[in-house]
Image: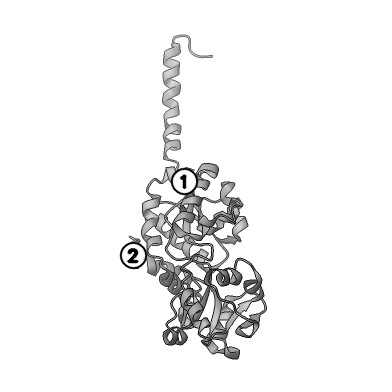
């Protein structure tokens, strides 16, 4: 029992005093690390690594879960709070919200704004500034053909085909047949590729289609690609610009849980210089250093960030 001469006020003060060390220890407990994740592909892992290093350079503890899984797994993980930050592509909002037929997804600015508003309102997920690069389905041609025929855009290609210019495309069956791929290009630009202008290859590996174009296999001088493929520059190919927006725009951007953004109010400013640097050519070059030259991913990430002055 308490000593009879100690008042209740004194007892309360003593208890509070005894509790101070524990309270101070709790106040000093650091927040949990920010979980930075990415999809399985090289580009996603490279972006995730650079994002993680930016946080670490600003004193934020990070736990990496790079190359965690495909889009579906990453989406489920961030919605469940199992990861905090990862690079996603704006055009995937069309599928996240079952709005595939909305024309906004074909315009870079409208797509970025639409997915930003939808995810903030419905899921407390914040989309930070996207890169300018667009990693969507595209058609690339050999540089010598581009130079000789003046090919810079798909409109130029339509003109070239109308003049019966040399052109044969290596592509997968999916690219040739899917309404969202080659048929959408043909509809938007008013050209048709007959079977003799196509080399349909099994699978969907753009490394194979690009190699066929680079080597002139069976008269091929063009290839189905993804816009930021690392081998595009190495194989001396040129991506033809989709000026009419036939394809959904897939710009990479950091996606972060609102709780983390509130904890790290500067995160948008921290990430902005990195993603502002990622033009189509810059991202192609970074990917090439990993997949073509074989440089370690972490080394490529660090070099790019140091070049931007983002590492201390």
Q: Which residue lies under the disc numbered 1? A: 260
Looking at the rendered structure, the secondary structure element under dot 1 is helix
Residue 267 on image: x %, y %: 40, 50
Q: Is residue 302 left or right of residue 228?
A: left
The residue at the point 46 percent across, 54 percent down is 110
Residue 131 on image: x %, y %: 43, 61
Q: Report crowding for label 1: few under 14, some 14 to 19, many 20 or more residues within 10 A (C-alpha).
A: some
Residue nearest the observer in this picture, 74 or 206: 206
Q: Is residue 89 something one can see in this rendering? A: no
Cα distance, mark 2 to mark 1?
24 Å
Q: Quadrant of the C terminus?
A: bottom left
Asked if residue 285 is positioned above or below residue 149 in the image, the reply reads above
Q: Quadrant of the N terminus?
A: top right
Residue 176 on image: x %, y %: 63, 74
Q: Which residue lies under the disc numbered 2? A: 308
Rendered image quadrant of residue 280:
bottom left
Looking at the rendered structure, the secondary structure element under dot 2 is loop
Residue 59 on image: x %, y %: 38, 52
Q: Of the two numbered discs 2 and 1 on the same chain, state the one appearing first in sequence.
A: 1
Q: Is residue 177 something one can see in this rendering? A: yes
Residue nearest the observer in this picture, 267 or 279: 279
Residue nearest the observer in this picture, 41 or 242: 242
In this view, which residue lies farthest toward the top?
4
The residue at the point 44 percent across, 53 percent down is 128
């Amino acid at each position: 029992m308490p000593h009879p001469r100690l008042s209740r006020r004194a007892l309360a003060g003593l208890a509070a005093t005894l509790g101070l060390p524990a309270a101070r220890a709790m106040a000093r407990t650091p927040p949990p690390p920010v979980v930075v994740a990415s999809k399985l592909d090289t580009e996603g892992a490279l972006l995730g690594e650079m994002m993680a290093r930016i946080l670490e350079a600003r004193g934020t503890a990070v736990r990496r879960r790079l190359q965690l899984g495909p889009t579906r797994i990453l989406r489920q993980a961030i919605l469940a709070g199992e990861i905090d930050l990862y690079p996603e592509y704006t055009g995937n909002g069309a599928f996240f919200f079952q709005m595939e037929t909305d024309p906004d997804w074909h315009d870079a600015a409208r797509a970025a704004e639409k997915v930003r508003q939808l995810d903030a309102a419905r899921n407390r997920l914040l989309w930070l500034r996207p890169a300018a690069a667009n990693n969507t389905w595209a058609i690339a041609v050999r540089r010598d053909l581009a130079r000789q025929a003046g090919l810079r855009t798909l409109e130029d290609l339509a003109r070239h085909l109308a003049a019966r210019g040399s052109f044969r495309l290596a592509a997968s069956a999916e690219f040739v047949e899917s309404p969202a791929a080659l048929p959408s290009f043909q509809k938007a630009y008013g050209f048709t590729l007959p079977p003799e202008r196509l080399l349909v290859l099994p699978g969907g590996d753009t490394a194979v289609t690009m190699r066929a174009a680079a080597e002139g296999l069976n008269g091929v001088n063009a290839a189905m690609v993804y816009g930021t493929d690392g081998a595009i520059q190495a194989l001396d190919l040129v991506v033809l610009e989709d000026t009419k927006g036939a394809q959904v725009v897939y710009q990479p951007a950091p996606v972060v849980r609102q709780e983390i953004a509130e904890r790290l109010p500067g995160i948008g400013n921290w990430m902005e210089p990195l993603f502002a640097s990622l033009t189509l050519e810059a991202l192609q070059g970074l990917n090439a250093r990993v997949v073509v030259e074989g440089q370690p991913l972490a080394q490529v990430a660090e070099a790019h960030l140091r070049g931007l002055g983002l590492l201390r």
